[in-house]
Amino acid sequence: MTTQVIKQLRCTLSVVALTLLTSACSNYTPPPNGVVEKLYDFDHKVHYDQIKYNDDHYYLQIKSDSYQHFLKQSVFLLRHSQRLCQGRLPQLVVIAGVQGFDRLPTYPRPYEPDLQVEVRCVKKP
């Protein structure tokens, strides 16, 4: 194959790949309000379920995996709540799953439930 043909083939493959990627991204339709959406955050490595009741009210359930990972889950919760509220103030109500924090525990840690939180977005004063 000549260099010209190889360049043309690369260009054509690039265009096809970009077209497929664009069409895949544009086909995402958010679920209707009240339906559980199972998601994963790659930055914090957190699996979570999210229910959107309306634009100002959400339910998040962050999957518990380890005592050491709880810090990342908590930071994810704060950042994700800010993202959901888009400029409004996130108001968090913790339902379950807050883990104790002991530097040197003297007993085995029991299994902790998933971190469950309701997020309400309120206007800034």
Image (cartoon, grey):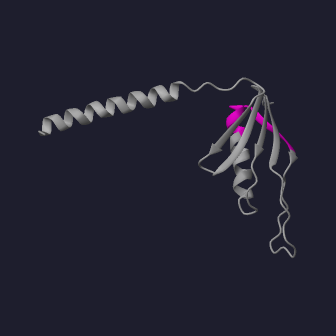
Position of 83 with respect to 28 (left or right) is right
Position of 118 with respect to 25 (left or right) is right
Answer with the quarter of the image where residue 109 lies.
bottom right
Work out whether 108 lies above or below 82.
below
Which residue ends up furthest to the front in the rendered image? 1
Q: Give x and y (percent) for residue 56.
A: 78, 27
Segment colored magenta: 81-94
**Is residue 70 covered in magenta?**
no
Image quadrant in which the N terminus is located: top left
Q: Nearer the viewer, residue 74 or 45?
A: 45
Residue at 87% x, 76% y is 106
Work out whether 5 lies above or below 63.
above
Work out whether 38 lies above or below 23.
below
Position of 14 with respect to 54 (left or right) is left
Residue at 77% x, 35% y is 89
Image quadrant in which the C terminus is located: top right
- Counting labels gives 0
Residue at 76% x, 33% y is 51
Q: Give x and y (percent) for residue 16.
A: 35, 29
Q: Give x and y (percent) for residue 59.
A: 79, 36
Answer with the quarter of the image where residue 34 lies.
top right
